[in-house]
Image: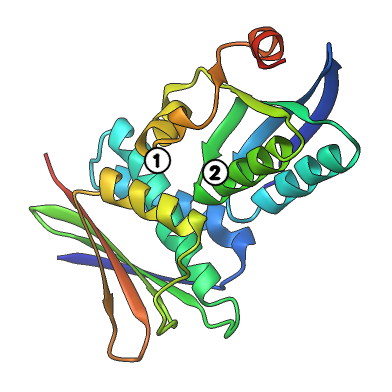
Amino acid sequence: MSRVEIEIPPNPVFAGVARLAVAALARSAGMDEERVEELKIAAGEACANAMLANEDTQAPVMLSWQESAEALILEVKDRSTSGSSSDDRMALSVALLETLVDDYERHPTDDGGTCARLSFHRG
Amino acid sequence: MELGLDVRKVGSHSVVDVKGEIDVYTAPKLREKLIELVSDGSYDVVVNLEGVDFLDSTGLGVLVGALKRVKAHDGSLALVCTQDKILKIFKITGLTKVFPIHSSVEEAAGEAG
Protein backbone atom coordinates (compact mmCIF):
# COMPACT_ATOMS: atom_id res chain seq x y z
CA MET A 1 0.00 0.00 0.00
CA SER A 2 1.40 3.41 -1.03
CA ARG A 3 1.20 6.23 1.49
CA VAL A 4 1.81 9.98 1.21
CA GLU A 5 1.69 12.35 4.18
CA ILE A 6 1.30 16.12 3.99
CA GLU A 7 1.42 18.59 6.87
CA ILE A 8 -0.22 21.97 6.35
CA PRO A 9 -0.57 25.00 8.63
CA PRO A 10 -4.15 25.62 9.86
CA ASN A 11 -4.29 28.77 7.73
CA PRO A 12 -7.23 28.84 5.28
CA VAL A 13 -4.94 30.30 2.60
CA PHE A 14 -3.54 26.76 2.19
CA ALA A 15 -6.93 25.09 1.66
CA GLY A 16 -6.66 25.45 -2.13
CA VAL A 17 -3.15 23.97 -2.14
CA ALA A 18 -4.37 20.99 -0.11
CA ARG A 19 -7.22 20.37 -2.58
CA LEU A 20 -4.86 20.54 -5.56
CA ALA A 21 -2.36 18.18 -3.94
CA VAL A 22 -5.03 15.58 -3.16
CA ALA A 23 -6.52 15.92 -6.67
CA ALA A 24 -3.07 15.33 -8.19
CA LEU A 25 -2.61 12.20 -6.07
CA ALA A 26 -6.03 10.89 -7.13
CA ARG A 27 -5.31 11.51 -10.82
CA SER A 28 -1.98 9.73 -10.60
CA ALA A 29 -3.82 6.79 -9.01
CA GLY A 30 -6.10 6.60 -12.06
CA MET A 31 -9.26 8.21 -10.69
CA ASP A 32 -11.48 9.57 -13.47
CA GLU A 33 -11.99 13.31 -13.76
CA GLU A 34 -15.61 13.37 -12.58
CA ARG A 35 -14.65 11.55 -9.38
CA VAL A 36 -11.62 13.83 -8.92
CA GLU A 37 -13.99 16.84 -8.88
CA GLU A 38 -16.07 15.17 -6.16
CA LEU A 39 -12.95 14.27 -4.21
CA LYS A 40 -11.78 17.89 -4.39
CA ILE A 41 -15.04 19.06 -2.82
CA ALA A 42 -14.89 16.39 -0.11
CA ALA A 43 -11.18 16.93 0.62
CA GLY A 44 -11.80 20.67 0.76
CA GLU A 45 -14.55 20.14 3.34
CA ALA A 46 -12.42 17.84 5.50
CA CYS A 47 -9.47 20.27 5.36
CA ALA A 48 -11.64 23.30 6.13
CA ASN A 49 -13.19 21.50 9.10
CA ALA A 50 -9.75 20.57 10.44
CA MET A 51 -8.33 24.07 9.89
CA LEU A 52 -11.23 25.67 11.72
CA ALA A 53 -10.90 23.10 14.54
CA ASN A 54 -7.18 23.93 14.89
CA GLU A 55 -7.65 27.69 14.64
CA ASP A 56 -7.14 28.24 18.38
CA THR A 57 -4.16 25.95 18.88
CA GLN A 58 -2.52 26.67 15.49
CA ALA A 59 -1.55 22.99 15.36
CA PRO A 60 -0.86 21.73 11.83
CA VAL A 61 -3.43 19.71 9.90
CA MET A 62 -2.17 16.27 8.89
CA LEU A 63 -3.20 14.71 5.58
CA SER A 64 -2.52 11.07 4.88
CA TRP A 65 -3.17 9.55 1.43
CA GLN A 66 -3.22 5.78 1.00
CA GLU A 67 -3.77 3.66 -2.08
CA SER A 68 -4.72 0.01 -2.08
CA ALA A 69 -6.14 -2.30 -4.72
CA GLU A 70 -9.64 -1.66 -3.36
CA ALA A 71 -9.73 2.00 -2.39
CA LEU A 72 -8.14 5.45 -2.28
CA ILE A 73 -8.23 6.75 1.27
CA LEU A 74 -7.67 10.29 2.59
CA GLU A 75 -7.32 10.85 6.32
CA VAL A 76 -7.41 14.40 7.69
CA LYS A 77 -6.36 14.81 11.32
CA ASP A 78 -6.91 17.81 13.57
CA ARG A 79 -6.09 18.37 17.23
CA SER A 80 -9.55 19.21 18.42
CA THR A 81 -11.11 17.02 21.07
CA SER A 82 -14.51 18.61 20.57
CA GLY A 83 -14.61 17.27 17.03
CA SER A 84 -16.05 20.34 15.39
CA SER A 85 -18.57 23.07 15.81
CA SER A 86 -22.24 22.33 15.25
CA ASP A 87 -23.16 25.41 13.25
CA ASP A 88 -25.05 25.63 9.95
CA ARG A 89 -21.84 25.38 7.95
CA MET A 90 -20.86 22.12 9.62
CA ALA A 91 -24.25 20.55 8.83
CA LEU A 92 -23.79 21.49 5.16
CA SER A 93 -20.23 20.17 5.23
CA VAL A 94 -21.27 16.80 6.64
CA ALA A 95 -24.06 16.51 4.03
CA LEU A 96 -21.47 17.01 1.27
CA LEU A 97 -18.99 14.56 2.80
CA GLU A 98 -21.58 11.83 3.39
CA THR A 99 -22.92 12.14 -0.16
CA LEU A 100 -19.68 12.45 -2.12
CA VAL A 101 -17.53 9.92 -0.25
CA ASP A 102 -18.17 6.16 -0.47
CA ASP A 103 -17.30 5.67 3.21
CA TYR A 104 -16.99 8.68 5.52
CA GLU A 105 -16.29 8.45 9.23
CA ARG A 106 -14.82 10.54 12.05
CA HIS A 107 -13.09 9.07 15.07
CA PRO A 108 -10.92 10.27 17.95
CA THR A 109 -7.14 9.79 17.59
CA ASP A 110 -4.68 8.51 20.21
CA ASP A 111 -3.11 11.97 20.56
CA GLY A 112 -6.39 13.60 21.51
CA GLY A 113 -7.50 14.87 18.13
CA THR A 114 -10.05 13.83 15.54
CA CYS A 115 -9.51 11.95 12.30
CA ALA A 116 -11.83 12.25 9.29
CA ARG A 117 -11.46 9.20 7.04
CA LEU A 118 -12.63 9.52 3.44
CA SER A 119 -12.62 6.29 1.45
CA PHE A 120 -13.23 6.18 -2.32
CA HIS A 121 -13.75 2.73 -3.84
CA ARG A 122 -11.86 1.92 -6.98
CA GLY A 123 -13.72 1.01 -10.16
CA MET B 1 -6.10 32.71 -4.75
CA GLU B 2 -8.08 35.89 -5.05
CA LEU B 3 -11.83 36.17 -5.31
CA GLY B 4 -13.20 38.61 -7.89
CA LEU B 5 -16.22 40.59 -6.65
CA ASP B 6 -17.80 43.17 -8.96
CA VAL B 7 -21.05 44.91 -8.09
CA ARG B 8 -23.39 46.45 -10.67
CA LYS B 9 -26.99 47.59 -10.84
CA VAL B 10 -29.54 45.80 -13.02
CA GLY B 11 -32.87 47.57 -12.61
CA SER B 12 -33.56 47.74 -8.89
CA HIS B 13 -31.22 44.83 -8.12
CA SER B 14 -27.63 44.82 -7.00
CA VAL B 15 -25.77 42.12 -8.89
CA VAL B 16 -22.56 40.65 -7.49
CA ASP B 17 -20.47 38.94 -10.17
CA VAL B 18 -18.24 36.45 -8.37
CA LYS B 19 -15.11 35.02 -10.01
CA GLY B 20 -12.77 32.35 -8.67
CA GLU B 21 -13.00 29.88 -5.82
CA ILE B 22 -15.31 30.42 -2.83
CA ASP B 23 -13.77 28.47 0.03
CA VAL B 24 -12.77 28.75 3.70
CA TYR B 25 -10.14 31.35 2.72
CA THR B 26 -12.12 33.56 0.33
CA ALA B 27 -15.68 33.24 1.73
CA PRO B 28 -15.11 35.98 4.37
CA LYS B 29 -14.50 38.47 1.52
CA LEU B 30 -17.85 37.55 -0.04
CA ARG B 31 -19.51 37.85 3.37
CA GLU B 32 -18.06 41.37 3.85
CA LYS B 33 -19.26 42.46 0.42
CA LEU B 34 -22.80 41.16 0.97
CA ILE B 35 -23.00 42.73 4.45
CA GLU B 36 -21.80 46.02 2.95
CA LEU B 37 -24.52 45.92 0.27
CA VAL B 38 -27.29 45.33 2.80
CA SER B 39 -25.88 48.03 5.10
CA ASP B 40 -26.00 50.44 2.15
CA GLY B 41 -29.67 49.66 1.59
CA SER B 42 -29.49 47.05 -1.19
CA TYR B 43 -32.10 44.49 -0.19
CA ASP B 44 -32.69 42.85 -3.59
CA VAL B 45 -29.48 41.06 -4.43
CA VAL B 46 -28.43 38.71 -7.22
CA VAL B 47 -25.26 36.67 -6.75
CA ASN B 48 -23.90 35.56 -10.11
CA LEU B 49 -21.94 32.32 -9.68
CA GLU B 50 -21.21 31.72 -13.37
CA GLY B 51 -17.54 32.61 -12.90
CA VAL B 52 -17.11 30.40 -9.83
CA ASP B 53 -14.89 27.31 -10.15
CA PHE B 54 -15.29 25.95 -6.63
CA LEU B 55 -17.79 26.38 -3.80
CA ASP B 56 -17.60 24.84 -0.33
CA SER B 57 -19.79 24.80 2.78
CA THR B 58 -18.21 28.04 4.02
CA GLY B 59 -19.44 29.78 0.87
CA LEU B 60 -22.88 28.19 1.24
CA GLY B 61 -23.00 29.43 4.84
CA VAL B 62 -22.22 32.97 3.66
CA LEU B 63 -25.05 32.84 1.09
CA VAL B 64 -27.49 31.53 3.70
CA GLY B 65 -26.43 34.33 6.08
CA ALA B 66 -26.96 36.93 3.35
CA LEU B 67 -30.39 35.49 2.56
CA LYS B 68 -31.38 35.90 6.21
CA ARG B 69 -30.16 39.52 6.17
CA VAL B 70 -32.11 40.58 3.08
CA LYS B 71 -35.23 38.72 4.28
CA ALA B 72 -35.09 40.76 7.48
CA HIS B 73 -35.66 43.80 5.21
CA ASP B 74 -38.32 42.04 3.09
CA GLY B 75 -35.72 41.73 0.37
CA SER B 76 -34.62 38.89 -1.88
CA LEU B 77 -31.48 36.99 -2.76
CA ALA B 78 -31.36 35.10 -6.04
CA LEU B 79 -28.52 33.10 -7.55
CA VAL B 80 -27.37 32.67 -11.14
CA CYS B 81 -25.81 29.31 -11.87
CA THR B 82 -25.84 26.91 -14.82
CA GLN B 83 -22.70 24.89 -14.03
CA ASP B 84 -23.50 21.30 -13.14
CA LYS B 85 -20.62 20.97 -10.66
CA ILE B 86 -21.83 23.98 -8.66
CA LEU B 87 -25.53 23.10 -8.95
CA LYS B 88 -24.69 19.66 -7.58
CA ILE B 89 -23.51 21.26 -4.32
CA PHE B 90 -26.82 23.08 -3.89
CA LYS B 91 -28.74 19.88 -4.66
CA ILE B 92 -26.79 17.72 -2.18
CA THR B 93 -27.30 20.22 0.63
CA GLY B 94 -30.99 20.77 -0.15
CA LEU B 95 -30.40 24.47 -0.78
CA THR B 96 -32.12 24.38 -4.18
CA LYS B 97 -35.29 24.63 -2.08
CA VAL B 98 -33.95 27.68 -0.24
CA PHE B 99 -32.53 29.82 -3.05
CA PRO B 100 -34.17 30.78 -6.33
CA ILE B 101 -31.55 29.65 -8.90
CA HIS B 102 -31.69 31.19 -12.38
CA SER B 103 -29.88 30.67 -15.66
CA SER B 104 -29.16 34.36 -16.32
CA VAL B 105 -28.74 37.62 -14.43
CA GLU B 106 -31.59 39.20 -16.41
CA GLU B 107 -33.93 36.39 -15.43
CA ALA B 108 -32.88 36.59 -11.78
CA ALA B 109 -33.27 40.37 -11.63
CA GLY B 110 -36.63 40.15 -13.36
CA GLU B 111 -38.15 37.47 -11.19
CA ALA B 112 -36.59 38.31 -7.87
CA GLY B 113 -38.07 41.77 -7.79
What SS does tag 1 mark? loop
What SS does tag 2 mark? helix
Asked which quadrant contains residue A14, the reply is bottom right
**x and y percent of residue B55 in the render?**
53, 40
Q: Residue A62 carries which label?
A: none
**On the rendered structure, is A37 left or right of B113?**
left
According to the image, label 1 marks what residue? B93
**x and y percent of residue A78 in the render?**
42, 77
Question: With respect to residue A121, does B99 lie above or below?
Answer: above
| Mark 2 vs 1: CB contact within 8 A | yes
**On the rendered structure, is B50 left or right of A19?**
right
Q: Mark 1 lies on which chain?
A: B
**On the rendered structure, is B38 left or right of B57?**
right
Residue at the outermost right position: B40
> Quadrant of the image for the N terminus of chain A?
bottom left
Asked which quadrant contains residue A10, the reply is bottom right
Question: With respect to residue A81, does A28 lie above or below?
Answer: above
According to the image, label 2 marks what residue? B60
**x and y percent of residue B104 in the render?**
62, 11
| Whether residue A67 can be seen here | yes
**x and y percent of residue A29 in the render?**
24, 47
- The earlier-in-sequence mark between 2 and 1 is 2
**On the rendered structure, is B27 left or right of B85?**
right
Q: How is the image coloured?
A: rainbow
Q: Say what amino acid the circle numbered 2 marks.
A: Leu
Q: Do labels 2 and 1 share a chain?
A: yes
Q: Mark 2 lies on which chain?
A: B
